[in-house]
Image (cartoon, grey):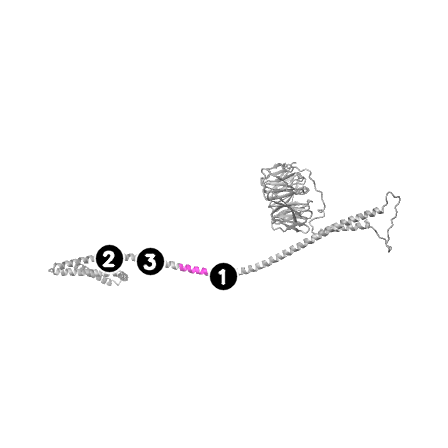
Amino acid sequence: MAAAAADARRVGAGIQTGIQTGIRRSAEPWRDHIICQLKHRDRNQHVMFQDLIRFYSRLLEKTSLTSGILNITTRHPLADSSSLTGLLHQNHLLKKTSGELAYQVVERQQQLKTKQCLVDEQNSRLMEERQRLEGALGVQQALQQRVEQLEEQNAALKVEYDELLERQKEVESRLREENLRGGTLLEDMIHLKKEAAARMNIHNERRSRARADLRKELTAEGSKVTEDSSSSAPTSRSTSPKPETLEEPSDGRRIRLFRSASVSSPRIFSSLKELFEKRRGHSVCSRHEDLVFPARICYSARVPARALHVLEAHDQGINAVRFSSSSALVATGGTDRLLKLWEVRTGSLTHRATLDGSTEGITCIDFDHTGSRVLASSYDKSALLWRLDDSIPKVTLTGHSRKVTAARFCGLHQVVTGGADRTVRLWDLHREACVRQVEVKSYCSDVVSSDNFIISGHFDSKIRMWDSRAAGCIQELPAQGKVTSLDLGVDQRLLLSCCRDDCLQIQDLRRWSLQRLCFRAEGFKCGSDSTKAVISPDGCYVAVGSADGAVYVWDVSSGNLETRLSDKHSSSISALSWSPSGEYVVSVDKSRRAVLWSDI
C-alpha cells in the first residue's frame, strides 16, 4: 500500500509538473486550445463518470483503511491471534467487496456505453424526424396553398354552376311551354284534319248523291225525250200524220208537255262537266294519268329456268323489287336509301334512273296502274311518291311513329301503308294527308289492296281484311306463323302469304273459308321477317326466295315443287317480282345482287 501511495504521489507530481510545463508553454496558441479542449472533455467525463469516481474513491478509502490496519498489525506483533484473524477476515471481505465493486464499475461502464449508443441513435433519429417534420411542414404549406387555390376555383365553379342551373331552369320552362304549345298545335292540327276529313266525306256524299240524282234525271229525261219523239213521229201504217190537239189553259197560254232534247242536253252536259271536272293546281295526278289504260292480260306465265342477267344493282343489300304494269321497267330499293329504275331489254337489265330522297333504307315498292308513278316505303317512318321523270319525291307521307314496312296504291288517288307502329293508314294523294287510320294489335309486315278492301299481314300469325270505306275489320284469317309478305292475284281472287315457319299458303277470297293450300319444300327456309313471295300473273305458280340463295317455284294446281333455281345468289333472297306479262322473274338478295330469270 505504501508503494501504491508512493506511485500515486509520483503520478500526481508528474501531472502537476506537466501542468506547470503546459503553463510555461501556454504562450503558444495551439497548445492553449488543446488544453482548453482537454479541460472541457475532463469536465464532461467527470460529469458522466461521477458515480464511478465516487465508488472508486470509496474503494481507495477502504484500501487505505486496510493498509492502516496492516501497518498497525505490523507495529504491534504482540496482538493476539484472534484479532489478527478478524482483521484478515475483514481484509478478505474488503478484497471481495473491492472485486465486486470493480465488476460493478465495469458493468456500469458497459451500461453507460450502451446508453450512450442509444442516446446517439435517438439523437440521429431525432434529427431525421426534425428533417421530416420540416419537409412535412413544407408540404403542408404547399397543400394549404393548393387547398386555397382549389377553394377559389370551387367557388368560381359554383358560381358557374348556379348560372348554368338558372339557365337550365329557364330552358326547361321554355321547353315545357314549347311542348305545351306543340301539343296544342298538334291537337289543333288533328282537329283541323278531322274537320277536313269530315268535310271531305260530306262533300263526297253530296257528290255521290248528286251523281245519283243526275243519273235519275238523265234516265227521266231520256224516257221523256223518247216518249215525245215517238208521239210526234208518224207511224208506218198511216199514210199521213194526224195533227195532235193540245189542251190550252183558260188563260190562253200553251203548255209544253215534254222538254225537248235540244233544250235539256246542253244543261245536262254542263252539269256533268262541272261535276267531274278536277282542279289541277298541286295535284299529284295529271290528266293523262286519270285515263283508263287497258291492262295486259297474261294467259300463261313462263316458269323461269335459267338466269339471263346477274348484276350488282346497289351498294348495299336490296330489300324490294317490283315490275311496272308494262313489264318494261323494274324498280329496286335497298338499304343504301336509293330507288333505282331498270329497263328490261333483250333479256338484260339496263340502268335508267336513280330516285333519291329517302333518308333511310327502302322496304317496299309499288307502281301505279299507268306505270308513270312509283311508291316506296322507308325506314325513316314515311312513304314517298315519285314521278318517273323526276328524281325528287313529289309527295312525302309522314305520320307513322316507326318504320313503314309496306306501301301500296289503292285506286287512282289513294295509298295504303302499314308500319311497325301497329297501324294501317289510308292516304289521300290530292290532300297529301291521312284520311283513315286503323289501330292493329300486332306489327304489320305487309299490305295489299283491292277496290273496296285492304288486307294486312301481321306478326301475331293473323291476316286481317278491312273495309276501306268503313275502316272496319271484316275477317281475320289464321296463318302458319309470322306473316312476312302478302301478294294478291291479278284477278284479286287468290291471296298468297309467306310465313316464318317456312311455309307459303294460298287462300281463295271468294269462298270466305279457312281452307287453304300450303306449299313446303325440303331445303326451303324463310330468310327474314320481310321475305317477299309472289304469285304468277296467271295464278298458276308461286315463287319465293330462300335463305340459302335459291329460288323455289311451286305449281298451284298440284302443290308440287316445279323448279329450284340456285347458284346465282350468295346470300339470303329478300324479294321477288314476276312481270305482268309472265315472261320474267327478278330476284334480289342481301348481298346487292339482282338476277333476271326466264326460260327464253
Residue drawn at (16%, 58%) of the image: 89
Foreground: 521 or 161?
Answer: 521
Secondary structure state at the residue bearing disc 2? helix
- x and y, in percent, of residue 317 in the image: 59, 44
Residue at image position (80%, 47%) is 223
Q: Earlier in the sequence, mark 2 or mark 1?
A: 2
- Residue 6 in percent (x, y) is at 18, 60
Residue located beneath label 1 in the image: 155
Badge 3, how many Cα within 10 Å: few under 14, some, many 20+? few
* Outermost residue toward the left in this view: 78
Q: Is residue 320 visible to us here?
A: no
Circle 2 or circle 3, nearest the eye: 2
Residue 122 numbered mark, or none? 3
Instruction: Please tell me whether mark 3 sits on a helix, a strand or a loop.
Output: helix
Q: Amino acid at mark 2?
A: Gln
Above or below residue 100? Residue 303 is: above
Magenta highlight range? 136-147
Badge 1 local density, few (<14 within 10 Å), some, or many (20+)?
A: few
Q: Quadrant of the N terminus?
A: bottom left
Instruction: Of the two numbered discs 2 and 3 on the same chain, state the one appearing first in sequence.
Output: 2
**Kind of residue at disc 3:** Gln
Residue 301 pos. (x, y %): 67, 38
Q: Which residue is mark 2?
A: 104
